[in-house]
Amino acid sequence: MICYGILKGSLKLLQQHSKVPSAANEGGEAEKTVDLEGAKGNKAGRAKTMGTPWWHNQAAIYGPKLLSFVESLLFYKMILAVFLFGFMEFVISGHFGSRKEAIMSTAAGETMQIFFVWLGLSGAFIGLPMLYYWLYKASFSYKKFSFLQYTVKAHLSIYNFLFYPLYMCRRLAYVLIVWYVEHPVFQFFWMMVLNYLALVYIGWHNPLLTRLQNWVEYYNQLSIVLVTLHMCMFTDWVGDREV
Amino acid sequence: MESIKPLHPDSYVLDRKVVKQLPRTDDQFRWNSMIDSLVSLLFATFIIALILAMVFSNTFWFTLAYIRYLQVCLHLPMMSISVPANVINFMRKTLVVPKLDPFRYLWRDETHFASFDFPKQDALRALMPDQTEELGYDTHNALIN
C-alpha cells in the first residue's frame, strides 16, 4: 500500500511538472530561474510559484548541487548499478538480517551487518527513488540521468521514465508474494499476474531506446513466464507419481 | 474411500504404496559432476559474452539484462512449490552470477576480521524456509548472503 501511495503520488506530481523536451527547450530554463527566485524570497517569483509545492523550489536549488556531488563520487555509476541490480538481494537479506533475534546478537560482525542492512534497505526504498525524483525535478534536462535512465527513452513518456521504479516495485512484489502468500496455487497465480503485467508494460510502452533492446526485454520477460509455467511440473498438477 | 482410515483428524493412512527410493548409485555422483561442468560452462559462456559485448557493442546493457532476468528466474524456488534436488542444486550454483557474489565462501574463513555468531545463526535457520536456505540464503547474515 505504501509503495502504491508513493507511486501514485509521484505519478501525479510528475504529470503536473513534466515537460516534454524539444530541441530548443527554453521553457525549462525559464521555469528553473523562476523557481530559484521564488525560493530566494522574490515576491514576483513567489506569486508565480504560488500553486507549486514547497519541494519544487527545494529541488530546484539543491538538486543541481546534489547532482554535481553525486557525479563527483568515484564509481557512482557502479554504486547505483549495485543498488539497482542487487535490489532483490538487498530486500531478501535485509528481511532476514533485520529479524529481532538476529539484531539482539552482540558479535562484532553482526553489528556491522545491521548497519549495512538498514543502509541497504533505506537506500533501496527511500534513497534511490528520492534521488531519482530530485534529479528529475532539478535538471529539467533528460541527459543528466545517466544510470537511472540507462537506455530508457524517458523524454517521450512518464511511463517510460518509471521503468526502473517499476522494476524495483516488481521485485518487491515478487518477494512479498513469496513470503506472505502461503498457498502455492495463489503464489503461482499472483506470480503469473505479475509476469503478465510486466509483459504488457514492456509490450505497450516500449520503454527502451532501440527496437533490439525492447525485443530482448520482451524475450526475457517471455522466458520468465515460461520458466514460471514449468513450476507447475513440480506440483500435484502432474497426476502420475512416477514421472 | 474405505481404505483411508483416519487415525487422527489431521492425518490419514496412505492407500497406495510409497514409491521406493532409488538405490545409491554412481549416477548421482555423475549428476553432480554434470551440474558442476554445466555451471562452469555457463560461467565460461558468460565471461565470453561479456568480452564480446564489450568489444563489439561497447556496452554492458545485454549483460545487465541477462543478470536481472536470471535473478527473477533463479529465485522461483523460494515459492512453496517443492523442487527436485538437482534443480535446486543447479540454481544455487548459478545464483552466484546474479547475486554478483563469486567470493561468497571466502567469508566463511575464520581468519576474517569480523566475528560472526555462527552457532546462533545456525539455530535461527529453523525460521527460514528450506528451499530459500538451499538457494544460498543459509544464514541471517546479510554480509555473507
Image (tube, helix red, strand yellow):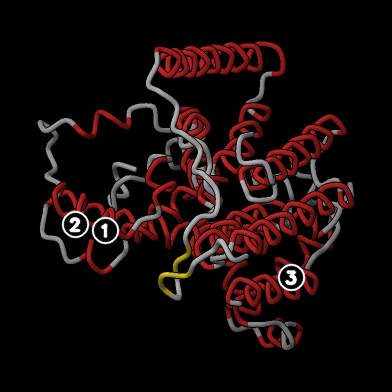
Q: Nearer the viewer, residue A181 or A139?
A: A181
Percent position of residue A192, x then y: 73, 54
Relative to B44, residue A238 above or below: below
Q: Would you say A193 lies left or right of B102 here?
A: right
Percent position of residue A130, x then y: 55, 64
Q: Residue at x 80, y 58 (%)?
A: A159
Percent position of residue A111, x then y: 19, 57
Q: Would you say B91 lies left or right of A152 here?
A: left
Chain letter of disc 2?
A
- Marks 1 and 3 in Cβ contact (< 8 Å): no
Relative to A96, residue A237 above or below: above
Residue marked by disc 3:
A11
- Marks 2 and 1 in Cβ contact (< 8 Å): yes
Q: Earlier in the sequence, mark 1 or mark 3?
A: 3
Disc 2: CA contacts within 10 A as few (<14), some (14-19) or many (>=20): some
Residue marked by disc 1:
A114
| Picture quadrant where residue B66 is located | top right
Chain letter of disc 3?
A
Disc 1: CA contacts within 10 A as few (<14), some (14-19) or many (>=20): many
Residue type, label 3: Leu
Relative to B52, residue A92 above or below: below
Q: Residue at x 55, y 39 (%)?
A: B74
Disc 2 versus disc 3: nearer the observer: 2
Residue type, label 1: Ile
Relative to B11, residue B113 above or below: above
Residue marked by disc 2:
A111
- Label 1 residue SS: helix
